[in-house]
Image (tube, rainbow, N blue to C red):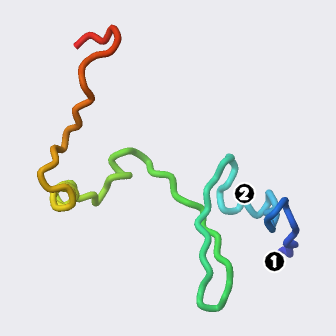
Amino acid sequence: MRTVELKKWGNSLAVRLPKTVLSKVGVSELPTKFDITVNKNNEIILRKQKEPESLKELFKGFDYQKYWSDWEKENPGRSKEEDWGGPVGREVF
């Protein structure tokens, strides 16, 4: 187990994580995002966020029918498509 020290960093407080610790959990590239939680024992838990492998994985479990059904309830009489007006430059359609 390693000890780290909480220090002032600008208007915040920070803990520096040693490279050896980060390499053990597979952190080698920056930026890397972490989720931070506090458990019932008031312990701070850092978990490296998993990067989505693909756009398909990112939307896995997304219910588009429910999404549009809810949208129509919240926006009665409104079209799903927006009218952006006619061309204003040399756009070719």
Q: Which residue is drawn at 68% across and 84% down?
A: 43
Nearest to the observer: residue 19 or residue 49: 49
Nearest to the observer: residue 22 or residue 71: 71
Secondary element at tag 1: loop
Residue 24: x %, y % from top left: 70, 62
Residue 93: x %, y % from top left: 22, 13
Q: Is residue 54 above or below residue 35?
A: above
Secondary element at tag 2: helix
Q: Residue type at mark 2?
A: Ser
Which residue is tagged 2? 23
- Quarter assignment of residue 12: bottom right
Q: Residue type at mark 1?
A: Met
User: What label does residue 1 carry, if any?
Assistant: 1
2 or 1: tag closer to the N-terminus: 1
Do labels 2 and 1 touch, CB within 8 Å? no
Mark 1 crowd level (few <14, some 14–19, many ≥20, 10 Å Cα)? few
Nearest to the observer: residue 12 or residue 17: 12
- Quarter assignment of residue 73: bottom left
Mark 2 crowd level (few <14, some 14–19, many ≥20, 10 Å Cα)? few
Q: Which residue is drawn at 20% across and 38% down?
A: 81
Which residue is farthest bottom? 41
Question: What's the CA distance linking mark 2 and mark 1?
Answer: 15 Å
Q: Is residue 45 above or below residue 84?
A: below
Task: Say whether residue 16 is left or right of residue 24.
Answer: right
